[in-house]
Amino acid sequence: MAKIGKLGNYNRLSTEYEKNQNRLIFIFCSSMDFQNQLLFLFSALGAINGLVLSIYFAFFTKQNQPSNYFLAALLFVLSIRILKSVFFYFNRDLSQTFIQVGISACVLIGPCLYLYIRSFTKSSMSIKKSWPYHIVPFLLITTVVWFFLPYWHNRKLWSTYLIRIIYLQWFAYILLSGFYLKGTFKKLFKKNRKLVDSEIFLLSVYLGVTVIWVAYFTVRYTSYIAGALSFSFVFYLLLLLWFFKRKRSSFFEKHTSYANKKISDEEAGVIAKQLDLVMSTKQLYRNPNLKLSDVAQELNISTHFLSQYLNDNMDKGFPLFLNEYRVKEAKQRLIESEHLTLAAIGEECGFKSNSTFYAAFKKITGLTPAKFKKQLI
């Protein structure tokens, strides 16, 4: 019931939000010719939908992964920047406060992109400790500039110098983000290695933000509306990519390991202790439908990070890791419980069927459950 109420509140919020935006768009469009109306609608709707989607990723996704929050923040600041560009392009008398808000949002685009990409290649524990260093200083600087050098009294300073500094900071974070995608870029050009869905989406977000930066940075040679149009194009392209690939896997929850980023021994030791503790005390393995993402959520780390740990540090996949716990429990039950049938033991330990129970047991112990039980007599 709580979830239904929460979803209902979100739907009402979205409906009211869309109504207000539609009124605003109608007012603007009524004073334009048909060509400008189309241009305004295409450039503005991408940003409006970006705001709605940022709310979805922040509050309504099933997995409360750090990457979802950083993606929400990235969409939010990009959308604010784009809306400012759109309305200013069609109305030069736009409130200068809104202009300053839009320009200031650019300060956080680079850091949000970096944190989103880094959250795929580092543990959640590491991200939770480091993200304030990339957000708080820029918020403080922006606040100080806001009060002491407001846009409405320093238009030339903002349009000539501050905006260039902001774009250079944005570009620096693009380069820094690209460093964490080295392995993905290398994989892109290797014939014998294919990118998985999460890598395709991650690369698309990175390249999309880069395209938007190029559009804004070269605006003096093109058109001021180019950045907004680039965002709408990139946004709907990513939306289509997500929609068509979503049935096979989730871009925001399922990931694969990155060869260029190894888990440190210290981090591996912490994960090993937490993983054994949660598996032993909560007996998650007894759930026949247990998924890698479920265990990752219990540990408060990303799914890809747990997968990387299992493959790189333990040299085993999730199914084998899970079956080892189930077989260990089955062996204990075979020793202690004489009245339970083999089928009942397999079921209670989390196996979906007798065949999977027998196959896993023999693979791990070298014996079938029946032979193992005979040895106990």
Image: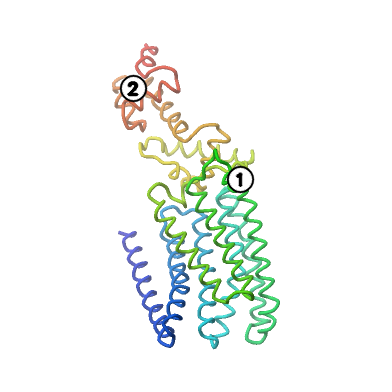
Q: Say if 229 sits above or below 67 in the image.
A: below
Number of numbered tags placed on the structure image: 2
Measured as percent of width and height from the top left, residue 33 is found at: 43, 85
Q: Which residue is mark 2?
A: 337
Q: Residue drawn 45% across and 28% down?
A: 324
Q: Residue drawn 50% across and 59% down?
A: 69
In the drawing, does residue 154 fall left or right of residue 304?
A: right
In front of the other: label 1 or label 2?
1
Secondary structure of the residue carrying tag 2 is loop
Q: Identify which residue, 132 or 338, lies in the foreground.
A: 132
Measured as percent of width and height from the top left, residue 246 is found at: 40, 51
In the drawing, does residue 239 fall left or right of residue 172?
A: left
The residues bearing labels 1 and 2 have C-alpha atoms spaced at a distance of 54 Å
Measured as percent of width and height from the top left, residue 204 is found at: 52, 56
- In which quadrant is the C terminus drawn? top left
Check disc 2 and give the amino acid type.
Answer: Ser
- In which quadrant is the N terminus drawn? bottom left
Measured as percent of width and height from the top left, residue 23 is found at: 38, 82
In the drawing, does residue 122 fall left or right of residue 292?
A: right
Residue 364 falls in which quadrant of the image?
top left
Secondary structure of the residue carrying tag 1 is helix
Q: Residue drawn 48% across and 73% down?
A: 43
Query: Which numbered disc, 1 or 2, marks the residue that appears first in the sequence?
Result: 1
Check disc 1 and give the amino acid type.
Answer: Lys
**Disc marking residue 186:** 1
Mark 1, Cα crowd under 10 Å, few <14 / some 14-19 / many 20+, is few
Q: Identify which residue, 170 or 235, lies in the foreground.
A: 235
